[in-house]
Image (cartoon, helix red, strand yellow):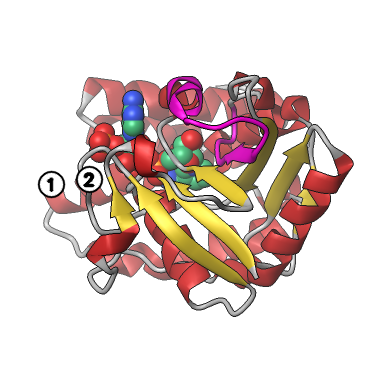
Amino acid sequence: MIKIVILGAGNVAKHLYTAFCNNKSAEVVQCYNRKGLQLSSDQKENTIIKDLSSIKEADIYILAVSDDAISEVSALLPFRNRLVVHTSGSVPMDTIDNAHRKGVFYPLQTFSKDKSVDFSKVPFCLEAVNTSDLKILKNLASTLSEKTYDISSEQRNILHVSAVFVNNFTNYLFSVGNDICKEHKIPFEILHPLILETAEKATKINPDLAQTGPAIRNDSETIKRHSKIVTNPLQQEIYLTLTKAIQSKYGKKL
Ligand SMILES: NC(=O)c1ccc[n+]([C@@H]2O[C@H](COP(=O)([O-])OP(=O)(O)OC[C@H]3O[C@@H](n4cnc5c(N)ncnc54)[C@H](OP(=O)(O)O)[C@@H]3O)[C@@H](O)[C@H]2O)c1
């Protein structure tokens, strides 16, 4: 049984807690967060601490805190030479305080508190200073997921930039689509099948081959009509910038 302490009470901490609670090979022995919050409604009060001085012994300490707090919280841990990992996509492993055996346990997925996630499909990007610690992390990740990868801090940062494009920016564009529908009182759900097909297709064929729409077709009259409908100046700028980007990538002219 791998003993875990989770630090933090945000999206990732809560999802990992729930996943480990349903896991026979790992046990969350304690959770730390500075407000003393439960990570799930059935979590026992005596497993939550808001003072690091009473932290229990464990095999792995998972710092699921904001990127900027990783260094600070790791430096506050009142022990030395234990395995301390963070869950960030972009923070170098070295950011963890030198008192500890360092590692990274990065689940490459988007986590929000009200949406459950199937961990068996979540790729875990793992890194550790020691090979024996990497093995421990692989064992732990394999209890949750079919996919584990040895990824250096440098590679993880690159993956994270890519993830910002495919998830954060795409989701922002979904929200713009939603705003435009709302403004014109059209149900956004009409676009749901398109959203799903877009994501599905990008995983089945090269995204370059999946590009469709007025920009790649060079339908300039349609583009003009669209830019009149998009009245919000920032959204209009995004529409024209992305149109230009598509046309320059595929050799068309605006
Ligand atoms: N959300 C995702 O989709 C996702 C996916 C993969 C990886 N990650 C990574 O996972 C980590 C956590 O992300 P998240 O989305 O779970 O963040 P989050 O929901 O914003 O939660 C952040 C947690 O960090 C705690 N925290 C912040 N500063 C602290 C400090 N100085 N001392 C102690 N605790 C502090 C917060 O506590 P308070 O409430 O007290 O401020 C909160 O519990 C980040 O490294 C992120 O890059 C996130």
Q: CB atoms at circles 2 and 1 under 8 Å apart?
A: yes
Badge number at residue 183: 1
Q: Is residue 234 above or below residue 36?
A: above
- Residue 85 covered by magenta stretch: yes
Q: Is residue 49 above or below residue 224?
A: below
Query: Crowdedness of circle 1 by 10 Å Cα count: few (<14), some, many (20+)?
Result: few
Say whether residue 116 is left or right of residue 200. left
Residue bearing mark 2: 180
Give the image location of residue 246, x and y in percent.
61, 31
Disc tally is 2
Q: Cβ(mark 1) to ligand 1 < 8 Å? A: no
Query: What residue is drawn where x is 80% and y is 46%?
Result: 134
Residue at the far right: name it. Answer: 131
SS for tag 2?
helix
Give the image location of residue 155, x and y in percent.
77, 31
Magenta highlight range: 71-90
SS for tag 1?
helix
Mark 2 → mark 1, Cα distance in angstroms = 5 Å
Frontmost residue, 29 versus 169: 29
Frontmost residue, 78 versus 5: 78
| Disc 1 residue type (three-letter) | Glu
| Disc 2 residue type (three-letter) | Ile
Give the image location of residue 38, x and y in percent.
25, 58
Query: What residue is drawn where x is 32% and y is 48%?
Result: 9
- Residue 165 covered by magenta stretch: no
Query: Crowdedness of circle 2 by 10 Å Cα count: few (<14), some, many (20+)?
Result: some
Q: Is residue 226 above or below residue 92?
A: below
